[in-house]
Image (cartoon, rainbow, N blue to C red):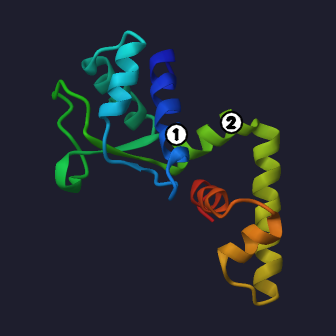
């Protein structure tokens, strides 16, 4: 991953984390483009970042109306994209470190299994038992495909 791609990915993940619902869907790329412009990158470079991140499996690009892909010859940034489980794993490892993230995943799996054995079926209850924010637990579950 190039520095440019990393900067874009960090912005995308920070945007997701800042939302109250923790959505992995980024429906407005304009603020990210503006921030990337401040770092010296133009919209075409942002588009190339998006394509590279898509090829690496970190994001899924969408055109308007939730079309699943965009024309690679297009010269503007995709207006919408989704952070994939692989992209989310990358973010968590970057944010928490590999060892801490692995512990979080192992704790979640152990707690989930214990709760399921005891008839506790809600993710909210698992999050409470782990003393972790519900959105973080949901995102880890998505990242790890649990």
In the depicted structure, whether residue 2 falls above or below residue 123: above
In the image, 56 versus 130, the foreground residue is 130
Q: Residue furthest bottom?
A: 119
Q: Quadrant of the C terminus?
A: bottom right
Classify residue 127 as left or right of residue 18: right
Label 2, residues with CA under 10 Å away: few <14, some 14-19, many ≥20: few
Label 1, residues with CA under 10 Å away: few <14, some 14-19, many ≥20: many
Q: Earlier in the sequence, mark 2 or mark 1?
A: 1
What is the distance, in whole Å, between disc 2 and disc 1 at their CAs? 10 Å
Q: Residue 24: where, in percent of width, then height?
A: 46, 51
Mark seen at residue 13: 1
Classify residue 46 as left or right of residue 9: left
The structure residue drawn at horizontal position 52% and vertical position 42%, both measured from the top left corner, is 87
The structure residue drawn at horizontal position 52% and vertical position 55%, both measured from the top left corner, is 20
Q: Residue 63: where, in percent of width, then height?
A: 21, 45
Classify residue 110 as left or right of residue 125: right
Do the CB atoms of the residues marked 2 and 1 lie less than 8 Å apart? yes
Q: Secondary structure at mark 1?
A: helix
Q: Secondary structure at mark 2?
A: helix
In the depicted structure, whether residue 8 falls above or below residue 99: above
The structure residue drawn at horizontal position 45% and vertical position 35%, both measured from the top left corner, is 56
Q: Residue 67: where, in percent of width, then height?
A: 20, 53
Q: Residue 47: where, in percent of width, then height?
A: 29, 26
Mark seen at residue 95: 2
């Amino acid at each position: 991953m190039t520095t440019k791609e990393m900067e874009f990915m960090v912005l995308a993940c920070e945007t997701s984390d800042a939302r109250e619902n923790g959505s992995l869907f980024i429906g407005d790329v304009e603020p990210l483009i503006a921030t990337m412009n401040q770092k010296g990158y133009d919209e075409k470079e942002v588009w190339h970042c998006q394509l590279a991140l898509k090829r690496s499996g970190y994001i899924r690009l969408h055109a308007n109306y939730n079309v699943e892909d965009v024309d690679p010859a297009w010269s503007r940034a995709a207006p919408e994209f989704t952070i994939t489980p692989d992209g989310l794993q990358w973010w968590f490892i970057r944010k928490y470190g590999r060892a801490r993230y692995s512990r979080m995943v192992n704790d979640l799996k152990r707690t989930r299994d214990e709760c399921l054995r005891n008839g506790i079926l809600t993710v909210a209850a698992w999050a409470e038992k782990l003393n972790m924010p519900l959105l973080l637990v949901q995102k880890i579950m998505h990242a790890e495909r649990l």
